[in-house]
Amino acid sequence: MEYLFEHKDKVRDYECDLQGIVNNANYQHYLEHARHEFLLSKNVSFAELHEQGIDCVVSGIEMRFKVPLKSRDEYAVRINLKKEGLRYIFLQDIYRLSDDKLCLKAKVEAVCIVNGRLGDTDILMKALQ
C-alpha cells in the first residue's frame, strides 16, 4: 500500500510493561503524534485551528495488534487519510523498521467541532493535496 506520510520514532524504555513489550495505551500516543506531524507537514496546526473556532477530535479508534514492539525498537507510523461524510478517517499502520514487520493496524475516526457544533471544514482535506 502507498501511504501519504511516514513518521519514524523509537520505543523508549518507560513505554514498556513488565513483559518487556510496549503497553497497549502507548500505541495511541504513537498514532496521535504521527497524525499531528502529518498535519504539520501540510501546514495544518491544531492550535491555529482552535483559534479559528475549529476543534478536530477523535470520535473512535479501532486498533488491531499484530506483533509487539519492544524497548529501543525503531518504528514507522504510516498514514493514509480519507473523508466519509463529516468524518475524517485516518488509516494508520505501525511497522517495526528492523524487519518491516506490521505491528499494528489502526482506523482512527475524527470529526470537527466548528464554533461549538459538529460541522464540516475542508481544512483537513487540503492535507490530501
Image (cartoon, rainbow, N blue to C red):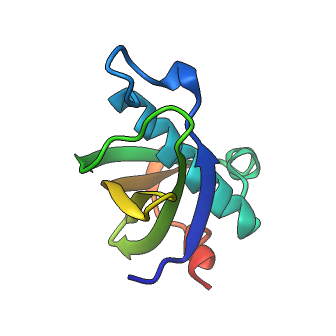
Quarter of the image for residue 23 reads top left
Residue sticking out furthest to the top: 18
Residue 78 visible in the shown view: yes
Q: Is residue 71 left or right of residue 1?
A: right
Residue drawn 50% across the image and 37% down it: 29
Q: Is 42 left or right of 74, judged from the image as shown?
A: right
Q: Quadrant of the N terminus?
A: bottom left
Name, please, the residue furthest toward the front. Answer: 98
Between 85 and 30, the residue placed more toward the observer is 30
Q: Would residue 105 appear left or right of 70 to someone viewing this image?
A: left
Question: Is residue 54 shown to the viewer in this render?
Answer: no
What residue is at 32 percent from the left and 71 percent from the top?
A: 85
Spot occupied by residue 86 in the image (x, y as percentages of width and height):
37, 65
Answer above or below: position of 12 versus 27: above
Q: Position of residue 123 (x, y in %)?
A: 62, 69
* 122 up-or-down from 55: above or below: below
Residue 51 sits in quarter: top right
Q: Residue at x 51, y 59 (%)?
A: 97
Residue 41: x and y in percent read 73, 66
Which residue is at a point 41% across and 45% down the rendered structure image?
A: 58
